[in-house]
Image: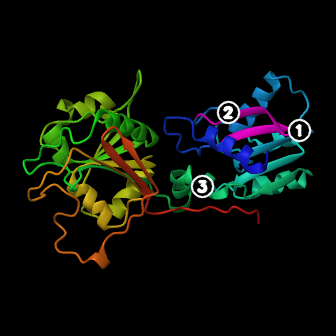
Amino acid sequence: MNADFFMSRALKLADSPEDCLLPNPRVGAVIVRDQKIVGEGFHRGPGFPHAEIEAIKNAEKRGVRKFDRCEIYVTLEPCCHLKKRTPPCVPVLIEKKFKRVIVANLDPNPLVSGKGIQELKKAGVSVNVGTLAFEAMKINQDYIKNQQTKLPYITLKIATTFDGKMADDFGKSKWITTEESRAEVQKIRARANAIGVGRNTIDRDNPSLNVRLSKKSLQRIIVIFGRPSKPLNRLKVTRKNGSENIHVVETKKGLQKTLRSLFDQGILHLMIEGGSKLASEFLREGLIDQIHLFQGKGFLGGKGRYSIGSHWGLMRLEKSIKFSPENVRLLGSDVLIQGFTHVYRTHSKSR
């Protein structure tokens, strides 16, 4: 078994939590001795032990007492700073005398960003950086963007017929997609800490917009672009998510400035869900980072009043907004197309 095998396992662990972990990254760790996994762990969210500590505890439960013959594979650089809820991991790795630390990526957080690697090397620990670096970046795109730009990560969910209509010409959209697709939407929602929707969608559909996973119901911050016609306390979205989580915003200053303000209010991963106009505006301004496009129902025809870019006017093919699907799969009779429109990179080599 090679390094890729063990790092792949660490990445799977890192990406296993269903809920949003921001402002913290997704991190997994695997401890290996004599080419066998003897401990593993992952970070569960703010306030919980980091992946390295979880893996060490797991190894000790399995009977490991000394780590001087062990390697630890970590999907993100071990932390070394004190400005957080939990103690830094680097001193623990040094204390346990790991013979080698294998890291996928350096942490883009300027409080770390290579400093953890330097401390390990200074203590005589062998360190390798860059194993499955790109794969590790992909699971932390929202965290990397937060650290590098101080803006929310923006995900767009669109549900259309096979000819691109988000609703019929009377505004009816329930249900374009199947139950399998709607269950998948809940999983995507869970990865964001906020849901964005236009006031027209609130007025027309009165959606709940909370996260429903198995027996759990999770609240989310709800950003409503424009003021709904009904009082907020009469809306389902308020009852399901709490009045303290409802943000009504105007975009007179422009979406970019609005997003910077939302970031300052703790909105770190915003999932745009409602309305063709809102989705179109975010796309036209190049603000979408990741797209989840669900297609189903059939061919609707009509004028396409509720479709992406219906108000843009005539466009030439060469001027189209580019989108390259990365993953395509069937969900019942629906098709889910997923891909990134922006990819954020961190350093994969120590400096």
Q: Secondary structure at mark 1?
A: loop
Task: Give the x, y percent position of residue 94.
Answer: 87, 43
Q: Secondary structure at mark 2?
A: loop
Residue at image point 21% right, 56% down: 163
User: Mark 2 = which residue?
Assistant: 49
Instruction: Please give the range of residues in magenta.
Output: 28-44
User: Mark 3 = which residue?
Assistant: 137
Q: Amino acid at mark 3?
A: Met
Q: CA distance from mark 2 to mark 1?
A: 26 Å
User: Mark 1 = which residue?
Assistant: 34
Tell whether 222 sits left or right of 8. left
Looking at the image, residue 16 lies above or below residue 310:
above
Residue 32 drawn in magenta: yes
Task: Give the x, y percent position of residue 325.
Answer: 42, 59
Question: Sequence-wise, which precedes: disc 1 or disc 3?
Answer: 1
Question: Sequence-wise, which precedes: disc 2 or disc 1?
Answer: 1
